[in-house]
Image: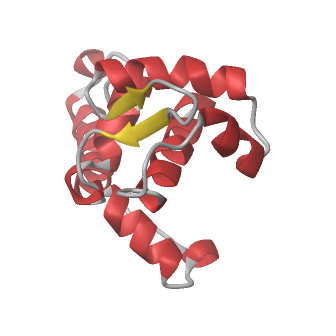
Amino acid sequence: MKISTKGRYGLTIMLALARKHGEGPLSLKAIARENDLSDHYLEQLASPLRNAGLIKSIRGAYGGYVLAKDPDEIKAGDIIRVLEGPISPVEGMENEEPAKQALWIRIRDAVKDVLDTTTLEDLRRHEHDGYQDAYMFYI
């Protein structure tokens, strides 16, 4: 399974909002500028995140986006599923021979476990603790 820029940049948006949680809205332009990304592309990603109830938009001169829930209630898997679709290492697993099918299912379940047990708060805290470059997941 390969996470595309949609998933990666979606996590970037969500992690930026988690860092500012409780401090008011943050604009996508600010997130784009801070991460050297296209604000237009981030706008495209914000819509499905908002529709999924993960973020809320705040209108006005000092508007932007905020998390719809606390960072410890939003899982990385929630974000990836919204932007990437179902988590699956291969398409058509049901058509594989039993041994390979079992392998693909084990891989899928391991990836799901990591994504569904890692919250935005975990990522924010890890980054805050000074291990930003050393965050490694083992599957």
Q: Residue at x 30, y 59 (%)?
A: 118
Judging depth in this view, the residue of 49 and 90 nearest the camera is 49
Q: Position of residue 25 (x, y in %)?
A: 46, 43
Q: Position of residue 99 (x, y in %)?
A: 24, 38
Q: Residue at x 22, y 39 (%)?
A: 102
Judging depth in this view, the residue of 94 and 25 nearest the camera is 25
Q: Is residue 90 visible?
A: no
Drawn side of residue 10 relative to residue 48, left or right: right
Drawn side of residue 33 relative to residue 58, left or right: right
Q: Position of residue 115 (x, y in %)?
A: 32, 50
43 to 135, vertically: above or below? above
Judging depth in this view, the residue of 89 and 46 nearest the camera is 46
Total residue callouts: 0
Q: Is residue 132 visible?
A: yes
Drawn side of residue 37 relative to residue 126, left or right: right
138 to 38, vertically: above or below? below
Q: Residue at x 25, y 28 (%)?
A: 53
Q: Residue at x 35, y 34 (%)?
A: 55
Q: Position of residue 112 (x, y in %)?
A: 27, 46
Would you identify the image quadrant in which residue 54 lies?
top left
- Image quarter in which the C terminus is found: bottom left
> According to the image, what is the colour scheme of the structure?
secondary structure
